[in-house]
Amino acid sequence: MSVLFVALPLALALGAAGMIACVYCIRGGQYDDLETPAVRILIDDRDTRSKPAMDADSDRRSNPDA
């Protein structure tokens, strides 16, 4: 019987902590968009990998002998 005096408040405290953590995450926006992160890996982002075009002025500054 004395074990219940320890186990019951401990279980209630852990349950309350879980509920508080769940509400905190929901209000913080953790569960707003569940689809986009899973599809983000499939998006082809060629624009970010393309090299910038070099103009003639920048080529002359880097190589004055040319």
Image (tube, grey):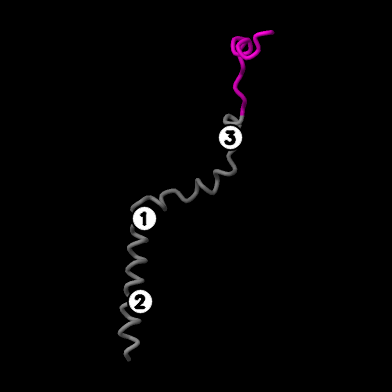
Task: Tell me the mark number nearer the camera, choosing from 2 and 1.
Answer: 2
Residue drawn where x is 36% and y is 55% of the image: 26
Q: Amino acid at mark 2?
A: Ala
| The stretch drawn in magenta includes residue 55 | yes
Residue 27 lies in the magenta-colored region: no
| Circle on res. 47 | none
Earlier in the chain: of badge 3 and badge 2, it is 2
Q: Between marks 1 and 3, how big is the CA–CA gap?
A: 30 Å
Magenta part of the chain: 50-66
Image height of 9 relative to 49, above or below: below
Tell me what residue is drawn at x 63 percent, y 10 percent. 60
Secondary structure beneath disc 1?
helix
Mark 1, residue position: 26
Asked where in the image residue 20 lies, by quadrant, the reply is bottom left
* Residue at the front extreme, as displayed: 65
As drawn, the residue found furthest toward the bottom would be 1
Q: Pinpoint residue 22: horizontal percent, then vertical percent.
A: 37, 61
How packed is label 2: few (under 14 Cα within 10 Å), some, or many (20 or more)? few
| Mark 1 vs 3, N-terminal side | 1
- Where the N terminus falls, by quadrant? bottom left
Which residue is identified by label 2?
Answer: 11
Q: Choose the circle earlier in sequence order: 2 or 1.
A: 2
- Distance between mark 2 and mark 1 Cα atoms: 23 Å
The residue indicated by pointer 3 is 45
Rendering coords of residue 10 (x, y %): 34, 77
x, y percent for residue 19: 34, 65
Q: Which residue is located at x 41 percent, y 49 percent?
A: 32
Q: Is residue 51 above or below residue 16?
A: above
